Image: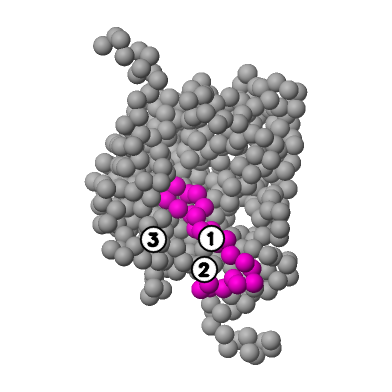
Amino acid sequence: MSKKKDARKTPAEQQESTLKRWLKERRITEVECLVPDMTGNARGKIIPAAKFSHDYGTRLPEGIFATTVTGDYPDNYDDLVSPSDSDMILRPDPDTVRMVPWATDPTAQIIHDCVTKDGSPHELAPRNVLRRVLALYEAEGLRPVIAPELEFFLVQRNTDPDFPLLPPAGRNGRPETARQSYSIDAVNEFDPILDLMYDYCEAMELDVDTLIHESGAAQLEVNFEHSDPLSRADQVFLFKRTMREAAMRHGIYATFLAKPMENEPGSSMHVHQSLVDARTGRNVFAGSKPGKHSDRFLHYLGGLQKYVPAAMAFFGPNVNSYRRLALGQVAPINVQWGYDNRTCGLRVPMDTPENTRVESRFAGSDANPYLAIAATLACGYLGMQEKLKPTKPLAGSAQDLGYALPRSLEEALALLQDCGELQQLLGARFVKAYVSVKQKEYETFFRVISSWEREFLLLNV
């Protein structure tokens, strides 16, 4: 087709033509049409590449965003979706097309956006929630820059949920038993798995920067390069699939559960964040004088301190999340901030003025990256709009100041329901659906009688 004919196509038609060309050049036979759900897992359809288009097979019921992690539905399900449980239309994002390196046949994966029949962004889709917050920054002439740090554990295969998880054996045939923070040799114990992970990440063009061994047994952390929030959320979403696949190819599991083992630390998803002027590219957090921060930085920090407690249901989205926060050795327990202070929930790294940023340490590795990033940006945005002032930076241990965050998912959801400011920014319909799904999950969990209750309470109360 000539360039002249191609120019007459609509933007959507041009994107479809580009995608089809990409698929044809790589002889793709199947396409995975992916949609991140409320949990951050992949939903969607697999269709033949020859039939891939913007319309064929790319529709899903909106009820997937009102489904719990157990596959149940909230009691008010009919109030969350349309009476007919109508279909959403999926639109492929051409920037997200990638190979599926572990597939037997040439397969592509493409993240899709969800729109209504009139073409509007669907309010319940987590990717659209993040886009909604980013639009607020765009209107202010600002562009957020994000860098996630994601922790996870490698564990032995476990098919019995009543059996505790155990660390796997490395190349030496023995599982780890001691703390191995930043140990190169400990990382090398899992070379075959990590080599495969890197091969997969390279094939998928994931911007994994560094890899370290964390303090837990077979606990690792990957850092992503700084970039725009949507691409970073996409990369965390895709990396989780990738790491699980690489681990399973070697007969073990990779888990992003926030607190998977009783005597091991929890896993977090720290989010480094800064703002740049969309026109000049200048970091607006940097002050006009050396050693000083801008008013925008201080307002942003004040917003995080005020609104993070109400946003904790996005940083700690599961009942297990609060085991990490309440029982973790280095997990934040309040909203204090400090310079290079890892006991604080908000850490400001010591760096050059152009790299001024704040590291939010609240989210667990189990958080939906789209929602966790959207929530932290929403908190900062509110701080700038309200011109809030933060507390003085803390030089000592924030752990000595006590707990100032919700202690359970139930408490976190109650705080979110009472926060009209966050609901307005994230979307009232979305927040209602999110709270309903998570309340149902909490109720399902609360019905389960644990082995601890049977052991210590059965005959003693």
Name the colouring of the figure.
Answer: one colour
For numbered disc 1, what is the local secondary structure?
strand
Q: Is residue 391 left or right of residue 17?
A: left
Q: Is residue 187 left or right of residue 433?
A: right
* Residue span colored magenta: 33-56
Mark 3, other Cα within 10 Å: few <14 / some 14–19 / many ≥20 = many
State the residue in front, 374 or 64. Answer: 64
Q: Name the residue located 71 percent from the left edge and 32 percent from the top edge.
A: 190
Q: Are marks 3 and 1 in contact (CB under 8 Å)?
A: no
Mark 2, other Cα within 10 Å: few <14 / some 14–19 / many ≥20 = some
Amino acid type of the residue that numbered disc 1 sits on in the rendered structure: Lys
Q: Badge 1 is on which residue? A: 45
Q: Are marks 2 and 1 in contact (CB under 8 Å)?
A: yes
Q: Is residue 410 magenta?
A: no
Q: Which mark is residue 62?
A: 3
Q: Name the residue located 64 percent from the left edge and 51 percent from the top edge.
A: 207
For numbered disc 3, what is the local secondary structure?
helix
Q: Badge 2 is on which residue? A: 57
**Earlier sequence position, callout 3 versus callout 1:** 1
Q: Which mark is residue 329?
A: none
**Coordinates of residue 147 in the picture (x, y in percent):** 55, 48
Relative to 333, residue 61 above or below = below
Amino acid type of the residue that numbered disc 3 sits on in the rendered structure: Glu
Relative to 272, residue 159 above or below = above
Q: Name the residue located 54 percent from the left edge and 50 percent from the top edge.
A: 237
For numbered disc 2, what is the local secondary structure?
loop
State the residue in front, 350 or 433. Answer: 433
